[in-house]
Image (cartoon, helix red, strand yellow):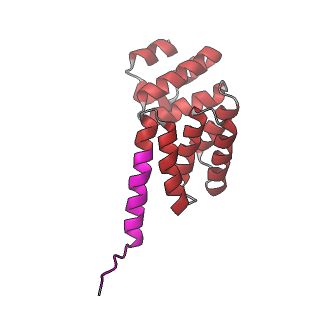
Amino acid sequence: MKEVAHFSSDDQEINLEYIYNIGVGHAKRGKPRDAIFYFDKVLKVEPIHVRALVRKGNALGKLGKYEDAISTYDAALKIQPTHVICILNKVLSQDPNNTLALYHKASSKSLQNKIEEAIILLEHAIISDPQFAEKAAHDKDFEPLQNNEKFKSLVA
């Protein structure tokens, strides 16, 4: 008698995370089409995988498919209505120069210790509205950037 492999739900979760992480890797290397391929594989098995939806929305935005990106963010927000990054990305998809959204996304990136991304977003916000320099100088969310020379010059 042939033995049939049975996978537990834990095995499936591990496999989904593995596939999701492959997608994240492609996204980080600037390959949004490849990333979407893997996020879609995850979403086929688990349609409510919020992180895959958000990352897919990001990748769609990088491809200039803003309506598709917004629809994907909407799907994520139906599952998790308070997902801050998703809300910010949706706003930025509709209005890439929305200063408040740029500032808050920079704040989120700072808290995630993604220094380079935070600096770039904050710089765009400050260029659009110099008042954000003063705000960022006293915002605890930007503490991880306090020793960064670029941050110091932006908020000086």
- Magenta-drawn segment: 2-23
Report x, y in % for residue 93: 66, 34
Q: Position of residue 11 (x, y in %)?
A: 37, 67
Magenta part, dominant SS: helix
Q: How many numbered circles are shown?
A: 0
For the N terminus, the quadrant is bottom left
Q: Is residue 147 magenta?
A: no
Write down the quadrant of residue 116 in the picture: top left
- What residue is shown at x 59% (from left), y 39% (from top)? 60
- Horizontal arrangement in the rendering, residue 41 relative to residue 12 (left or right): right
Specify whether residue 130 is in view.
no
Q: Residue at x 65, y 52 (%)?
A: 75
The spot of residue 138 in percent (x, y) is: 52, 24
Q: Residue at x 48, y 27 (%)?
A: 118
Residue 123: x %, y % from top left: 54, 18
Q: Residue 6: name its quadrant.
A: bottom left
Q: Nearer the viewer, residue 10 or 106?
A: 10
- Taking depth in this image into account, of 33 and 139 the one nearest to the observer is 33
**In the rendered view, would you say 66 is above or below 37?**
above
Q: Quadrant of residue 14?
A: bottom left
Magenta region includes residue 20: yes
Whether 75 is drawn above or below 64: the answer is below
As drawn, 25 above or below 156: below
Task: Note whether 39 is above or below 141 in the view shown.
Answer: below
From the viewer's side, name the closer residue of 30 and 76. 30
Q: Residue furthest bottom?
A: 1
